[in-house]
Image (spheres, rainbow, N blue to C red):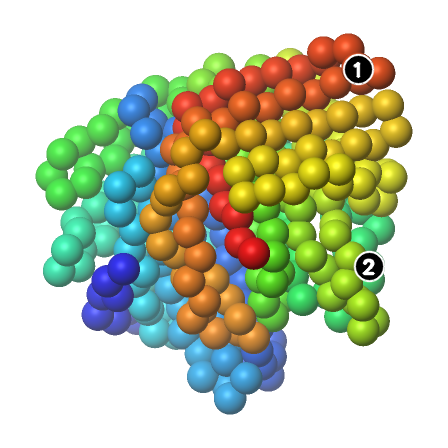
Amino acid sequence: MKQAQDIRSRHTISGSKSSSAKGSFRGWYFKHQLPAGTVAFIPGFQISPDGTRSAFLQIITNNRSEYISFPYESFSWQKSPLKITLGCNTFSADGIDLDIQTESLHIEATLRYGVLAPPKRNIMGPFRFLPFMECRHDIISMYHSVSGKISVDGTPIYLHETCGYIESDWGRSFPSSYLWTHCGTDDCGTKSIMISVARIPFLGREFWGVIASVIDNRQEYRIATYRGAKIKKLQHHSVEIVQHHYRLVFEAEDQSGQELLAPQDGRMNRVIRENISALGHYRLFYKNKFLFGMDCERASYEYVE
């Protein structure tokens, strides 16, 4: 993974982050399923325990990833309506305007989003009120249409109402062990699924937490620890979760991927891997009867142990 030189900007900080915060991070994950493949943009900022601050943009495609550092002063964000500014680049609820050029990559994007579809209730449920959580998670949109153009090293890719997804993470560190996956169908809103299982430290102990949202024809099935979900089986490439009469199964056939940097005590210095276009199989059963299924060639997938 090659880190590009800092990109300078005259933009200044605004939004809801405290200048006194230390050992913290926040990042947003904007995913776009292309006609062939997938691309995600991850803008964010980090504050190390010693108070050192910087902003960043990670870009991941089927066959490459880039981590680009920005000066902290070039970054700003607001929660509602969502808008993130990173240098001359913007990421918002309406879409993305991007122009990035490094020694190894030139990528331009002008993308427009349809109406975002957040879950009806916060994905973390009552866990969002627990103190001292090392990482918190929010789904901003389970699905929305994406139209526009992305150009990578001069090669244009045109999108017309393909599927998009947005989430956010913030806190101190990513979990020590976790599995995360997402995929949506091109006919946005028909089917979309996100699953996350993670080892969570709390009050000197640890437990495995589950959050999952399954969208089928715009109807949501929520699978979560706070609703009684338990992990029945967890392996590098698969997970099986049970919740009362529900059983949710995910399996990935491709376990390779690209390197990304993840936060550890605020510093973006932990290397993980994500396959952004894995072949994934999703199944949901109720009382052992098939309820939902999706075989996805562009499943995003991470497993860290």
Quarter of the figure with residue 171: bottom right
**Residue of label 2:** 129
248 sits to left or right of 274: right
The mark lying in front, picked from 2 and 1, is 1
Quarter of the figure with residue 259: bottom left
Quarter occupied by the N terminus: bottom left
Q: Residues within 10 Å of mark 1 (few under 14, many from 20)?
A: few
Residue 288 — which label?
Answer: 1
- 162 shown above or below 239: above
At which x and y percent is residue 114? 48, 27
Q: Earlier in the sequence, mark 2 or mark 1?
A: 2
Single out the residue that lies furthest toward the top. Answer: 289
- 300 shown above or below 115: below
Count of marks overlaid on the render: 2
69 sits to left or right of 245: left
Q: Secondary structure at mark 1?
A: loop
Q: Secondary structure at mark 2?
A: helix
Residue 152 or residue 233, whichever sits in front: 233
User: Residue at the location (45% across, 67% down)?
Assistant: 270
At which x and y percent is residue 269? 43, 71
User: Residue at the location (31% across, 38% down)?
Assistant: 62
Report if residue 61 is visible in the image.
yes
At which x and y percent is residue 150? 25, 35
**Label 2 is placed on what type of residue?**
Phe
User: Residue at the location (73% across, 44% down)?
Assistant: 210
Quarter occupied by the C terminus: bottom right
